[in-house]
């Protein structure tokens, strides 16, 4: 939560709202009680109805007159209740004279009025509850500090040992990190230079690579001169710099809030630009102006990362320079890869003689469709090649809180000590300490920045404030999620998830076409903290970085660091590694890793290394190609002074028959894993590792116990049980098949069974609300509806999965079976068409395709089926059922099939105060359509509509402010 005047003002507004709400509710309930007393003493039904009607008018401040004629009545838009009261006045007057008005009709009118009073009473009750929940949330942090102190002396021995273990792990992790970054690791400058000289053709063996390198060096020199020119900062530049810095994850909540204040003040932006321009003018002598504080932050997956807390102006200055260099190198490396003859292509052209024969026999008269090889190259270049670097200065795309990969290493370290997961009951004691060991890591690199192709669902979706559109297309808004499956991945997590879908697709296709596929994957161990400075400067110098800029990079890397809890100690200069979450750090890492990409490309003659920063995968139907690629990875690691993470290193060789084939001894031993998924080498399917899930369920249990307010509990549940588990199960895909969705559904049921004792998350929260706030009979919809409608916005992970379950291929392998059948039929049709051609046509076509010197008798027999299918992955042999379509269909995420709405649902949605778009803008509409249809009827019966609370009574500003910050995870 950000501090400052803004948050203080919101706090004051929240307090005022809650005070006024309390007064309003008290006044309404007093009137209701008085009216109830009057009605209980009146036996005459007509008189009782009149008393009730007057009581409703008084309670709701409704003024009507049936005697005063108003010619403009039809122009006044009345609320449903006002219209009811106005009509009932007339009907009751009729009932005084008209004996045909039955007692049953009068009773119905009475019930209708009583229902309106009860609905309003419920709205006040739940508005008060909402206010109490916000108050509890705001005070929970301070209460937690006091509770933590009090619990130190009352913890059980078991809990104390867990806390002690966590403390030891943090201390050991810090010590390991310090051993890395404060001890220089000198790599062999001559060996690196010789390696790069050979790789980039400077030894004369690859002339095109040499030309491309020289062009790259010239670009680096030119850009370095341009970037050091004075006067580059202005308010426009600062806006994209600030936005990128906010999303980088580098800054604390307070500093992010300060930067947002900067954006709101043109005067401040101008002043800041002036100061930064002065720093840019003194680039030659720039250095850190003070010691830089370092702190450990715990991530959701149990790891601790090191973050540096630098001055805001310094951070802005470095962000600008880092982003500019990042964008430049992204374009420069793309230009290198497109340089004619420098980069080995995966999609080799079909030999001319073979292409001529295909054209002669098959007659390419129809519109040519894409090929699988072309698609592979396109996906690699557009998604994975240098994906850590942004395409432009304005690009930004970060993951939501909780969307991060589960750490398998920590499961292995604690597997021996795993205990049964304690279940959740009310009034749990102090939270369990983390079971995980500390890892010597620092903050991850900043997220790759990409343009948003469409509005993304927000991490904290409640409180959206989109204006109501005058010409709002309601149907289009409700169906905004339909047909979106073809969009390319954008966020870091989406890119990682897509590689799983891509690999699964390649396993299906390659085992069917070639009988097998081999895959190896790994990541570098503590890549950021361990990267040798000597390697960085050697590579940057090889690419043409000037002495001036090399000095700047050196000063940036050799920062004086001091831990925040070591106030009295002296700062120590970093001698190894790069600062986490910095754009300049990404430049250092990616320029080195580009050499790895190129090394694999050259050694394998075009096999693609699918790399996301320091995490990389390589696969091919050729086992030897993977072996060559892996050996080039090992050579790169040895020369550059980096090591592989054994826990995330492994290889498989999958065959169509499921039989085991020998794996080359040079390939690493280990499983292919990602998140909670493990690749089965026999079936070629990703399966969920349940023991690993159970370990994280234990951690979720610990985190939930630590949350002292209902809102923070739900936020932790949504982040951990929702996004974290969902992400690490892997997003459903056609290539995964329906069994994967079923496994996810079963796992989520298993998770709830482990956490809750003979109950579920809804019952647990209802019991909690009853115990803490005395409110009973809470509707289920109140827990699930968004906070913009007065609900608690509990996320249900089952809904999203059930929406797409039936849209996933039950057995994706059948697509290849269908392809083979279509291919046989296409061969028959092509052969039949050829044999029907007139001889003179064949003569003319032979000349057209330059077969003049060849005896036509050699071309009289149609090509063999083997020749027809030889280039399946490079060309389309027929119009329908081509391999390209199989490839694309397997990669697609299934479309969602949400709950259907009828006209009454639409009416209720349109009746929401402020408009349906305001309440649900930026959210997953398929999910919310399901929630509204499932729970809407109960909510309407209780609250008279979909909103549990009138919009103006909700302190949504404070709720949004608090929830905009990242969750502080225990441990």
Image: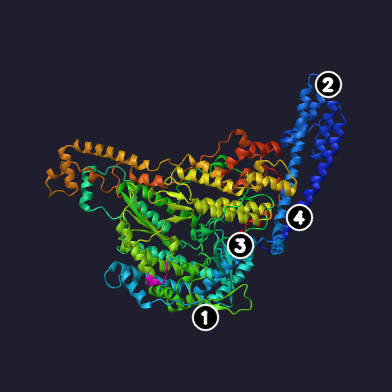
Q: Secondary structure at mark 3?
A: helix
Which mark sits nearer the N-terminus, 3 or 2?
2
Q: CA distance from mark 3 to mark 4?
A: 39 Å
Q: CA distance from mark 2 to mark 4?
A: 52 Å
Instruction: Give the residues in magenta.
Output: 638-643
Of the image marks 3 and 4, the number of the one nearer the N terminus: 4
Q: Is residue 644 above or below residue 466?
A: below
Q: Mark 3 or mark 4, which is nearer to you? A: 3
Disc 3 versus disc 2: distance between alpha carbons? 80 Å
Expressed as whole percent of the image width and height from the top left, the position of residue 154 reads: 70, 62
Q: Which one is earlier in the sequence, the residue at label 1 or at label 4?
A: 4
Say whether marks 3 and 1 touch (CB < 8 Å).
Answer: no
Q: Nearer the viewer, mark 1 or mark 4?
A: 4
Asked whether the beta carbons under mark 3 and mark 2 sit within 8 Å of each other, the answer is no
> Quick one: 170 or 944, which is closer to the camera?
170
Identify the disc placed on residue 162: 3
The disc label shown at residue 97, or none: 2
Where residue 341 appears, as percent x and y from the top left, is 29, 63
Q: What whole-number distance in Å separates the C-alpha atoms at marks 2 and 1?
A: 98 Å
């Amino acid at each position: 939560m950000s501090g400052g005047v803004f948050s203080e003002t919101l706090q004051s507004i929240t307090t005022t709202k809650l005070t006024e709400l309390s007064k309003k509710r008290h006044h309404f309930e007093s009137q209701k009680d008085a009216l109830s007393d009057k009605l209980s003493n009146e036996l005459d039904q007509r008189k009782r109805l009149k008393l009730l009607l007057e009581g409703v008018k008084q309670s709701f401040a409704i003024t009507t007159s049936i005697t005063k004629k108003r010619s403009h009545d039809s122009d006044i838009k009345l609320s449903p209740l006002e219209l009811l009261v106005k009509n009932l006045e007339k009907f009751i007057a009729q009932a005084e004279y008209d004996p045909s008005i039955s007692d049953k009709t009068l009773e119905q009118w009475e019930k209708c009025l009583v229902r309106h009073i009860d609905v309003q009473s419920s709205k006040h009750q739940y508005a008060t509850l909402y206010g109490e929940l916000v108050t509890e949330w705001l005070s929970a942090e301070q209460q937690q500090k006091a509770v933590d102190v009090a619990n130190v002396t009352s913890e059980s021995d078991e809990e104390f040992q867990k806390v002690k273990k966590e403390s030891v792990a943090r201390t050991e992790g810090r010590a390991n990190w310090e051993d890395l970054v404060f001890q220089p690791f000198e790599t062999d400058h001559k060996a690196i230079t010789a390696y790069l000289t050979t790789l980039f053709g400077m030894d004369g063996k690859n002339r095109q690579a040499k030309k491309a390198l020289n062009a790259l060096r010239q670009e680096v020199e030119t850009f370095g001169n341009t970037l050091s020119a004075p006067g580059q900062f202005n308010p426009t530049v600062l806006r994209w710099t600030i936005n990128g810095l906010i999303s980088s994850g580098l800054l604390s909540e307070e500093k992010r809030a300060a930067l947002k204040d900067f954006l709101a003040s043109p005067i401040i932006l101008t002043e800041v630009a002036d100061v930064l321009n002065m720093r840019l003018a003194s680039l030659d002598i720039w250095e850190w102006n003070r010691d830089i504080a370092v702190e450990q932050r715990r991530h959701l997956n149990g790891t601790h990362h090191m973050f540096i807390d630098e001055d805001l102006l310094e951070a802005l200055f470095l962000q600008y320079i880092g982003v500019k260099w990042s964008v430049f190198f992204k374009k420069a490396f793309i230009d290198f890869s497109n340089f004619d003859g420098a980069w080995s292509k995966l999609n080799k052209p079909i030999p001319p003689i073979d292409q001529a024969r295909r054209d002669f026999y098959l007659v390419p008269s129809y519109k040519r469709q894409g090929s699988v090889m072309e698609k592979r190259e396109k996906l690699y270049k557009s998604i994975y090649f240098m994906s850590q670097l942004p395409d432009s200065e304005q690009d930004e795309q970060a993951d939501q809180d909780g969307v991060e990969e589960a750490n398998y290493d920590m499961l292995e370290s604690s597997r021996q000590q795993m205990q049964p997961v304690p279940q959740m009951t009310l009034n749990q004691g102090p939270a369990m300490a983390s079971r995980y060991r500390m890892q010597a890591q620092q903050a991850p690199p900043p997220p790759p920045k990409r343009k948003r192709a469409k509005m993304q669902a927000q991490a904290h979706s409640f409180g959206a404030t989109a204006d109501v559109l005058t010409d709002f297309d309601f149907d289009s808004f409700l169906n905004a999620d339909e047909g979106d499956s073809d969009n390319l991945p954008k966020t870091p997590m989406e890119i990682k998830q897509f590689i799983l879908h891509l690999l699964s697709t390649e396993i299906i296709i390659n085992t069917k076409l070639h009988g097998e596929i081999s895959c190896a994957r790994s990541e570098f161990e503590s890549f950021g903290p361990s990267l040798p400075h000597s390697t960085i400067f050697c590579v940057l110098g090889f690419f043409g970085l000037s002495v001036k800029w090399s000095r700047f990079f050196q000063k940036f890397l050799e920062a004086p660091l001091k831990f925040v809890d070591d106030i009295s100690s002296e700062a120590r200069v970093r001698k190894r590694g790069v600062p986490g979450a910095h754009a300049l750090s990404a430049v250092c890492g990616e320029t080195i890793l580009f050499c790895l990409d190129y090394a694999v490309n050259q050694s394998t003659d075009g096999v693609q290394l699918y790399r996301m920063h320091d995490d990389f995968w390589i696969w091919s139907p050729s086992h030897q190609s993977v072996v060559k690629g892996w050996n080039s990875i090992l050579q790169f690691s040895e020369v550059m002074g980096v090591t592989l993470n054994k826990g995330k290193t492994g290889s498989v060789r999958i065959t169509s028959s499921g039989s085991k084939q020998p794996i080359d001894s040079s390939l690493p031993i280990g499983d292919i894993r990602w998140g909670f998924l493990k690749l089965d080498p026999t079936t070629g399917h990703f399966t969920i590792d349940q023991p690993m899930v159970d370990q994280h369920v234990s951690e979720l249990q610990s985190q939930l116990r630590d949350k002292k307010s209902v809102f923070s509990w739900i936020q932790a549940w949504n982040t951990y049980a929702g996004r974290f588990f969902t992400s690490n199960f892997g997003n459903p895909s056609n290539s995964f098949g329906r069994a994967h969705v079923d496994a996810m559904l079963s796992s989520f049921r298993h998770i709830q069974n482990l956490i809750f004792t003979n109950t579920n998350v809804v019952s647990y929260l209802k019991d909690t609300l009853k115990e803490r706030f005395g409110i009973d009979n809470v509707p289920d919809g109140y827990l699930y509806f968004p906070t913009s409608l007065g609900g608690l916005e509990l996320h249900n992970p089952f809904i999203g999965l059930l929406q797409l379950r039936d849209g996933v291929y039950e057995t994706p392998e059948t697509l290849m079976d269908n392809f083979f059948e279509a291919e046989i039929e296409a061969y028959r049709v092509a052969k039949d068409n050829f044999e029907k051609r007139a001889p003179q046509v064949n003569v003319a076509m032979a000349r057209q395709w330059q077969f003049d010197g060849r005896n036509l008798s050699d071309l009289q027999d149609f090509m063999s089926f083997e020749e027809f299918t030889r280039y399946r992955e490079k060309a389309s042999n027929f119009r329908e059922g081509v391999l390209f379509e199989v490839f694309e269909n397997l990669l697609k995420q299934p479309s969602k099939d949400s709950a259907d709405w009828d006209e009454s649902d639409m009416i209720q949605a349109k009746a929401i105060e402020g408009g349906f778009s305001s309440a649900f803008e930026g959210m997953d509409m398929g999910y919310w359509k399901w929630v509204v249809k499932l729970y809407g009827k109960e909510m309407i019966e209780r609250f008279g509509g979909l909103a549990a609370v009138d919009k103006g009574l909700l302190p949504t500003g404070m709720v949004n402010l608090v929830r905009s910050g990242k969750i502080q995870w225990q441990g």
